[in-house]
Every structure is written in structure tokens, then in C-alpha cells.
Amino acid sequence: MAFSNESDHGALVLGTSSLGARGVDEAALETARALIGSGLRIDTSNAYADGRSERVLGLALAKLDSAERDVAASRVITKVDRDPDTGVFDASRVRRSCEESLERLGVDHISLLHLHDPYTVTVDEAFGPGGAVEGLLQLKQEGIVDAIGIAAGPVPLVRRYVDSGAFDAVLCHNRFTLVDRSASDLFAAAKDLGMTVFNAAPFGGDLLVRGPRPDARYDYRPIGDALRRWTAGFFRVCTSYDISPAAAALRPSTISPIVDHTVVGVSSPQRIAELLTAHSENIPDALWSAIDALGPVPSPIDDTEYEGA
Ligand SMILES: NC(=O)c1ccc[n+]([C@@H]2O[C@H](COP(=O)([O-])OP(=O)(O)OC[C@H]3O[C@@H](n4cnc5c(N)ncnc54)[C@H](OP(=O)(O)O)[C@@H]3O)[C@@H](O)[C@H]2O)c1
């Protein structure tokens, strides 16, 4: 069964890579309840916060009555991860990772399960006998998961998985934003194959909402002076049009016909409310002209080491 794609283009998905980072406490549970209560899809992973992201979501799901729980659980998307100690990422590890996720979430079924950041194996190993892809396909065949996806950053690597035709969905991050569009062809190819496309980290990890602070990062790495200057200009333009940087950074993804879902990281109930406000802000066309007038954006993304992956 294909992953249901009933949402409008650009439907928001709430990212939980920071959920439970400070422990399984009341603040984390309150956030998990707000995530579930939003009615939006939720993106998590076996590895986020060493499993606590899934654990906290599972505790919040357990408080619902069974009908509500089934609906809410069907909106939770998770990912299989390599063995955290050995880096092994084969079919056995995929099954084990999935079992851990089922246990933490308190469910017996997952709507969409991504292969997450397969950087410790080559693509040929992943597709080989006993490899991670075989493990995912078995889980799908057994009906434990409805659909399988590939979720990672480097475009040439993700493209190999997409072109295989084995996957129902693709997630790529930091590569379809105001700063970088290198995932455009990848997403278009995935759409041509009938896949569901998730564009994650539209704020570049947070640069495009927090601005050019001394410790600013894009794609989780420090930025250079040229991007810092461009970002300062972007913030000035947003201020002059009274548009929040979050709204401006979100819009290219949420209106794109090659993106089905935009995955944004949120760490509190307040962030969810801010995100929904940004999503509905009216943006005048003149803002885009003013952003264009800042000149070419110096993207720091360089995936050349993955060419020929
Ligand atoms: N390989 C993969 O599969 C992969 C890789 C990357 C990301 N993802 C998924 O995509 C999600 C999004 O990525 P991301 O969280 O790294 O980056 P992001 O969505 O570009 O940015 C999220 C950050 O922006 C901040 N933020 C959100 N709304 C804001 C607002 N209105 N004002 C100010 N700050 C705001 C959040 O800050 P606070 O922390 O203060 O809330 C959060 O730190 C992840 O959580 C994860 O689920 C998957």
C-alpha cells in the first residue's frame, strides 16, 4: 500500500529531532501532547535523542483512547537507524531498529518507515543480499509497515536510492531552501516516479529564523562570511516588509509542486503555534523581488564527495 498522500502540497510535518533531548520529563511530554494534538504528521527516528523522541511520543500516545491513538499513531513517521555502537546497517539491524521503534511508540504497525542516513554502508551493500533495503522490503511485505522511504542529505547518494524504484517516499534536508535548491532535480525525479516527497529543514537547521549570530550554522555546520552577509540582508528585507523570516523561509517549500510535505523542527508547544502563524502569513510579491535583489545566495552545501556514490 502506498503511503497516503492526502494533504495539500507543502503540508507541514513536525520534526522531533530535539524531542526528549533533555530527558523524558514533563516539558517533553507536554510538547509531545501538543505535537499529537496538532493533527499534523510527526517525523521522528529510532536515533533521535537516543530513542527518547520515540519514547516520549509513545508515552503521549498511550494516554489517548484506542480510537484516537490509532489515528494519531498513523500520523507518526519514523526511521530505522544503524546500530549506534557498531555502525552495522544490514537487514537484521533494520528489523531490530523497527522492533525498538514499535516498542517505544507502543504500536504494532508503522505507516512510513525511512532508511535513515545510510552512511556506514555503500549503496551496493544496502541493496545487496542481507542488506538494509532487503530488510525494509521484508517489513513492508509482512505488513508491519505500509510504505518505505529513504531519508538523508547528500543529493547524489539519495538519488541512487530514489532511482532504484524500491522506495515509496524520499526525505532530503537543507537542500530545498532559500539558500540552496540542489534537491530540485531529485524531488522532480521522485515525483515522476510517483513517490511522496518530504523536504526537511526549510530553515537550514535554524539560520533562516535566528539570523546571522556569531555561532550561526547552516546544515548543522558553521557558515562563512558571504552567507552571513546574505542572511543579514534577508533579515533586513523581512523587517522592512514586516514579514517574519520563518514565513519567508517556509513559503518556497510549501508552495512547490515538487514537495508534498515540509518537515520543520519544533521543540515546544509555542513553536508549533508560531509555525502555524508563519504558514498562514500573507507575503507580498515585492518581498521576493527584494530577496532576489540581494544577489546570488552563497550556499555552503557541497555534495561532490558523494558523486558516484
Ligand atoms: N536525515 C534526516 O532524515 C533528517 C535530517 C534533518 C532533519 N530531519 C527532520 O526534519 C526536521 C527539521 O529539521 P531541523 O529541525 O534540523 O531544521 P529546521 O526545521 O530548518 O529548523 C528547526 C529549528 O528552527 C527553530 N524554529 C522553528 N520555528 C521557529 C520560529 N518560528 N522562530 C524561531 N525559531 C524557530 C527551532 O528552534 P527551537 O529548537 O528553539 O524550537 C528549530 O531549532 C527534524 O526535526 C527532523 O525531524 C531529518
Image (cartoon, grey):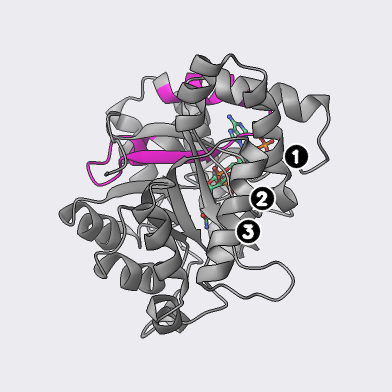
**Residue 74 visible within the image:** yes
Indicate the amino acid at tag 2.
Tyr
- Label 1: state its secondary structure: loop
Residue 33 locus on image (x, y percent): 65, 21
The quarter of the image holding the C terminus is: bottom left
Residue 181 locus on image (x, y percent): 35, 57
**Which of marks 1 and 3 precedes in the sequence?**
1
Compared with residue 271, is residue 234 higher up or lower down, i.e. above or below?
Answer: below
Compared with residue 99, is residue 25 higher up or lower down, i.e. above or below?
Answer: above
Position of 187 with respect to 264 (left or right) is left
Q: Tell me what residue is drawn at x 52 percent, y 46 percent.
A: 78
Q: Distance between the residues labelled 3 and 1?
A: 19 Å
Q: How far apart are marks 2 and 3 (CA)?
A: 15 Å
| Disc 1 target residue | 20
Boundaries of the magenta span:
251-279
Position of 106 with respect to 304 (left or right) is right
Q: Distance between the residues labelled 2 and 1?
A: 8 Å
| Disc 2 target residue | 48
Q: Tags 3 and 1 in contact by the CB under 8 Å rule?
A: no
**Which of marks 1 and 2 precedes in the sequence?**
1
Q: Nearer the viewer, mark 3 or mark 1?
A: 1
Indicate the amino acid at tag 1.
Gly
Q: Which residue lies furthest to the front in this view?
A: 142
